[in-house]
Image: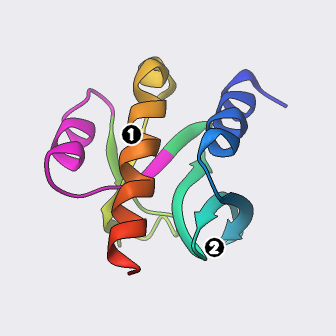
Amino acid sequence: MSSEETLYIEIGHSIPNSEQSQMFGKPCFKVNGKAFIAFFQNEMVFKLEGESHSLAINLEGAQLFDPSGKKRPMKAWVQVPYVFSDQWTAFANAAAEFVIETSR
């Protein structure tokens, strides 16, 4: 297991009430049955909105998540490179909050 994947798993388990799962055949974590983070191409992917989404997408190398590779990105999901792994926990917390709020 890569250090990137190990960090992703540690962060996922640090979120209260999260559970490991799959989304589009990719590893993810869910809260309340809804995916909020995923792991793809050794990078973490976050479901975000508002300021958190803007901060994430404006990081160098960040991109909208396109799991199919067919230029159909998922607009709420941002894939953030490992060079910004020091921000992954904050984005994961924001993603969990977003999913919890929208699932009420």
Residue for point 54% across, 38% down: 43
Q: Nearer the viewer, residue 2 or 72?
A: 2
81 vs 28, left or right, is left
- Helix, strand or loop status at disc 1: helix
How many callouts does the rendering have? 2
Q: Residue 54: where, in percent of width, then height?
A: 16, 44
Whole-angstrom CA distance, mark 2 to mark 1, is: 21 Å
Q: Quadrant of the N terminus?
A: top right
Check if residue 59 falls in the magenta segment. Answer: yes
Query: Which colour assignment does the render follow?
Result: rainbow
Amino acid tagged 2: Phe
Residue at figure coordinates x 61%, y 65% from the top left: 30
Q: What residue lies at 61% left-to-right and 77% top-to-bottom?
A: 33
Residue 23 seen in this snapshot? yes
Which of the two residues, 52 or 101, is positioned nearer the viewer here?
Answer: 101
What residue is pinned by disc 1? 91
Q: Earlier in the sequence, mark 2 or mark 1?
A: 2
Quarter of the figure with residue 29: bottom right
Vertical placement of residue 53 versus 66, above or below:
above
Q: Residue at x 33, y 38 (%)?
A: 62
Find the residue positioned furthest to the right. 1
Q: Determine the secondary structure under disc 2.
A: loop
- Per the image, the residue denoted by label 2 is 24
Residue 71 visible to an observer of this rendering:
no
Q: In the rendering, at what x and y percent does residue 104 appear?
A: 38, 81
Please tell me which residue lies in front, 20 or 65: 20
Image spot of residue 17 (x, y percent): 65, 58
Q: Which residues are magenta?
A: 45-61
Q: Residues within 10 Å of mark 1 (few under 14, many from 20)?
A: many
Q: Which mark is residue 31?
A: none
